[in-house]
Image: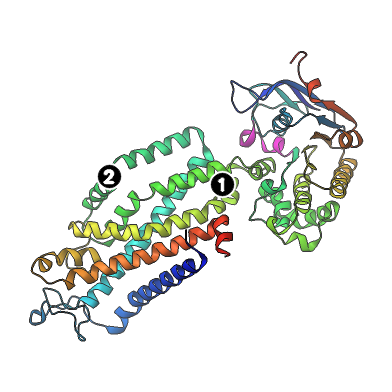
Amino acid sequence: MLELDAVTAGYDRRAPVVRGASLTVAPGESVGLLGPSGCGKSTLARVAALLHRPDAGRLVLDGTEVRAWRHRAPRELRTAVGVVFQQPRTAADPRLTLADLVVEPLRATGRRAEADARLAELAPAVGLTPDLLVRRPHEVSDGQLQRACLARALTLRPRWLICDEMTAMLDASTTAALVAAVEAYRAETGAGLLAVGHDRVLLNRWCDRTVEWKDCLPAGK
Amino acid sequence: MADPRTHRIRFWTSAVTVAAVLLAVLLVPPLVQLDEQAVDLSRKLLPPSWDHPFGTDDLGRDLLLRCVYGLRVSLLVGLVAALVATVIGTAVGAAAGALGGWADRTLMRLVDAFSSVPHLLLGIFVVALFRPGVWPVIVSVAVTHWLSTARIVRSEVLSLRTRPFVDAAVSGGSGRWRVAVRHLLPAVLPQAGLAAVLMVPHAMWHESALSFLGLGLPSHQASLGNLVQNARSSLLAGYWWPTLFPGLLLIVPTLAIAGLAGVWRDRLNPRRRSELML
């Protein structure tokens, strides 16, 4: 279970972006979080991905209450959650080739030996051809780069996947391909999904249930 | 703002000057096999001629040869001191930016403390601790010139560490050390390299200043600062060449190195790159 309970978070304690938001994702479930731009859903997603320490509230991941964020969080807890960001350009280290980008989590966790085999599995799954894998981010399109970012998020086989407006910048065919890749991974591993976005049609079709942002907040907020 | 043609002229002028200087300091001493300290009082203060293109000094030593040896020492001091200062500055700046919190505050207060003392005064204090020689001057210049690099690198790292690709690395299991070495340092190295190149001429000037004050290299050893210092009394007596040529050799290579650094800076800036069609 991924459980966000009364989370208050932001970038200035005096003016939090998220106030008392709660959301639960069951194992294997896909939940769409729907809200307008600037409402705080990406900040809540960052809290769920252990990338942003909340000012108040709890995050419980598979029965373990998270007490540390970012580098301070235990590595096994951090890597239990895969994240795909909205803008692939800023989410990819410009010096790495797409192949290096995809296997970087394996290298970072000391599993370098598995890199080639995992790359051979993931590249076709997300639609990356061998000629794309040797290119750097500035040599590929946004859609191709986002495919690599999705593959990177799946490299360590996370139990939870957070897609923060993953398809907001992409055309319909790339969106369909990426959603299909996520669903294939979930079908194989039973991972839970939190898909954040403002495209109601997409989230309704993609997810088991869609939650409106206002329904995450305490009544009257 | 320079147009592409001016940019090309600046690059080639600087590159040819730096290449000529490097060739001179690397090839002349082993090829000519002459003693730059050989005294011949019968030839003292001869004006420039075919035998002595830069003339001779008040002890009859050939000034061209002494200038080449002096430039060699000044370049060595400039390059090594700039390299050491850049390594220290990059390490401190990257640690401050990447670690943040109390480590950042402590390291930047250290930078402030060093900055609060005039760096020539601090440099004089450092050379005073050792016997005169090349290495005390290098240490003196290095320990007083890492501050600006530390500030540049810290600000770059502070800006980079909030980028989503760093978040992705953290989420992918990278520790602080790996994030710093794999993602942050490679991103700041071009800036640090530029700072190092810009520092070379400054370090040469600093060496010359210390030697001019009699605190750098031993006075018999040829360095540009020592040459200018030794030529002061001759200048007052109307002999201009012992001051002019070491002075020119201090100014021209430093301008050429600064020119190359400027070209590099333009290439690092994507907006300037597109303006100059690089």
| For residue B167, side relative to residue A61 (left or right) | left
Tag 1: amino acid: Ala
Mark 2: secondary structure = loop
Q: Which residue is label 2 attached to? A: B118
Label 2 neighbour load within 10 Å: few <14, some 14-19, many 20+: few
Task: Note whether residue B213 is visible.
Answer: yes
- Write the residue at 35% across / 58% down: B81
- Write the residue at 11% across / 73% down: B58
Label 1 neighbour load within 10 Å: few <14, some 14-19, many 20+: many
Q: Which mark is residue B180?
A: 1
A74 within the magenta span = yes
- Write the residue at 42% across / 60% down: B197
Q: Quadrant of residue B225?
A: bottom left
Please state the chain letter of the residue tagged with numbered disc 2 in the rendered image: B
**In this rendering, the label closer to the viewer, 1 or 2:** 2
> Magenta residues?
A69-80
| For residue B20, side relative to residue A29 (left or right) | left
User: Which of A28 and B120 lies nearest the eye of the viewer?
Assistant: B120
